[in-house]
Amino acid sequence: MIKTKFKLEKNKRRFIQPIKQFIDWIEVYREFNQNIHIIIHDYPILSYGYVNDCQIDMYHKTIYYSLYDIENDMKKNYSKKFNIDIITNVMIEVFEDLSLQLSKFYIINQENMTIHDFIVNYEKFEKQMYHEQRCMVYQFACMNTKYSKHLKSGLKITYDNAIPYKLQHAIELFEGFITEHMKFPIKTKVKMTYENLIDCDGYFKYPNNLFKYPKIKISLNDFECIENELGSFDAVLNILRILAHELGHYHAFVNGVWNYDQHKREIDAYNFENLIIQKFIDEVYYNYY
């Protein structure tokens, strides 16, 4: 459970509601088996040369976040590059700061470890901590129209080389089918390539920040080999299965579904793949053939 307390002057109370919305979302879509306290205040904190910052008391599970002088920071750091208003811009930064600290407790919970063990092994979990942070903020933004309205939507499939007509036509059929059966609130690009990917036939790349978009890459490297062995029907379906699997990761991500365990995320994507491919075969592919 996350308990949030606000100690703010009147001119900063406009930040209370969006922070509450973010914390409420975190409590629904992430699991914490410990009581965490967040204190949002507007007192100056001298930390690494900054007077507004986020500090954490790990042992007492308390996060202190200062909004001191945030108005000047809003003006100083604001950029029109992403076509968003100043308040939205600063709230995203606040969410990123808070989620970075919350990710520490989330990892401790998921790894079933003590705070002391986490501190001792901090470097081991640092990369995962930042990954969890980015996913928290991005998923929240995907599901909140105040933030998602600033992001592009849709699905785009491209090819880095010419591919067999029967495969391209099947992909186009699948693209039409999938866009009727699921939403793409956040733009994602799918690239079909003959490149030999390392240890996989395709992957879903999580975005690094809110203004980067998720990407999918699918290798066609084995298509001809499978076609020679099993025929065109199975060779094409194999590519579509890979695509459906990676779209399963996308579908879960933009709908707030999350598993700390990567293996469980793969199981969820596999289940999505089976469901959507069978539906595609029944409704479209058999008719086409």
Image (cartoon, rainbow, N blue to C red):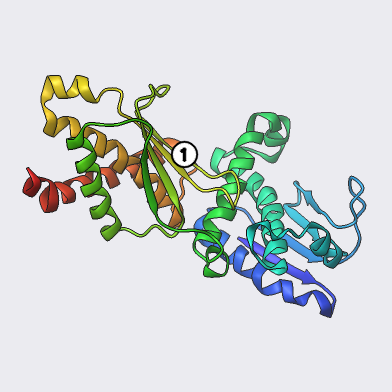
Q: List x then y, in percent, for residue 259.
A: 46, 45
Residue displayed at 30% across by 31% down: 162
Q: Is residue 133 left or right of residue 63?
A: left
Dividing the picture into quadrants, the one containing residue 85 is bottom right
Dividing the picture into quadrants, the one containing residue 159 is top left
Residue furthest to the front = 162
Q: List x then y, in percent, for residue 131.
A: 59, 41
Observer-nearest residue: 137 or 147? 147
- Say which element carries label 1: loop
Name which residue type carries label 1.
Answer: Asp
Q: List x then y, in percent, for residue 279.
A: 17, 51
Residue displayed at 12% across by 53% down: 283
Q: Residues within 10 Å of mark 1 (few under 14, many from 20)?
A: few
Q: Is residue 128 visible?
A: yes
Observer-nearest residue: 5 or 90? 90
Q: Is residue 232 above or below residue 13?
A: above
Q: Is residue 68 left or right of residue 173?
A: right
Where is the N terminus found, in terms of image quarters?
bottom right
What residue is pinned by disc 1?
261
Q: Is residue 32 visible?
A: no
Observer-nearest residue: 230 or 30? 230
Q: List x then y, in percent, for residue 230.
A: 11, 24
Residue furthest to the bottom = 10
Where is the C terminus found, in terms of image quarters?
top left
* Total marks in image: 1
Residue displayed at 14% across by 20% down: 228
Q: Is residue 256 above or below residue 274?
A: below
